[in-house]
Amino acid sequence: MKAIETTATINESGQLTLDKSLGSIKPQRVRLIVLISEDDEIDPDETPTEIVIEGIHQGLREALTGQTIPLSAMWEGIDAE
């Protein structure tokens, strides 16, 4: 079984509309788990999935092109007590 996470909107009839295509997946029945926020507000501290995914892609591009710094250099200037 394969899991795909995406977002969707529920309309007034209770039908789901996906925010983006799932790509080249053959037509088939699927199992669906719907997670609904207990309040209508979006958590302002939660980073949207699209931004998180873009950050991961950017990090991967940088790693593949050698745009990295040594881990030891990342600690320079950080005061850990």
Image (cartoon, rainbow, N blue to C red):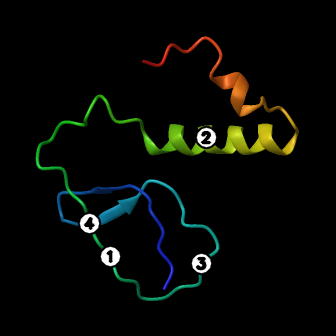
Residue identified by numbered label 4: 34
Residue identified by numbered label 3: 25
Kindly identify the amino acid type of the residue bearing the numbered disc 4: Val
Q: Earlier in the sequence, mark 3 or mark 4?
A: 3
Residue identified by numbered label 1: 32
Kindly identify the amino acid type of the residue bearing the numbered disc 1: Leu
CA distance for labels 4 and 2 = 24 Å
Q: Residues within 10 Å of mark 1 (few under 14, many from 20)?
A: few
Q: Earlier in the sequence, mark 1 or mark 3?
A: 3
Q: Residues within 10 Å of mark 2 (few under 14, many from 20)?
A: few
CA distance for labels 1 and 3 = 15 Å
Q: Residues within 10 Å of mark 4 (few under 14, many from 20)?
A: few
Residue identified by numbered label 2: 54
CA distance for labels 2 and 3 = 22 Å
Q: Is residue 29 left or right of residue 76?
A: left
Does the CB distance between marks 4 and 1 fall below 8 Å?
A: yes
Q: Is residue 20 left or right of residue 58?
A: left
Q: Earlier in the sequence, mark 4 or mark 2?
A: 4
Closer to the eye: label 2 or 3: 2
Quadrant of the rendered image containing residue 74: top right
Q: Position of residue 56 (x, y in %)?
A: 62, 44
Kindly identify the amino acid type of the residue bearing the numbered disc 3: Ile
Q: Position of residue 48 (x, y in %)?
A: 42, 39
Kindly identify the amino acid type of the residue bearing the numbered disc 2: Glu
Closer to the eye: label 1 or 2: 2
Does the CB distance between marks 3 and 4 fall below 8 Å?
A: no
Q: Earlier in the sequence, mark 1 or mark 2?
A: 1
Quadrant of the rendered image containing residue 8: bottom left
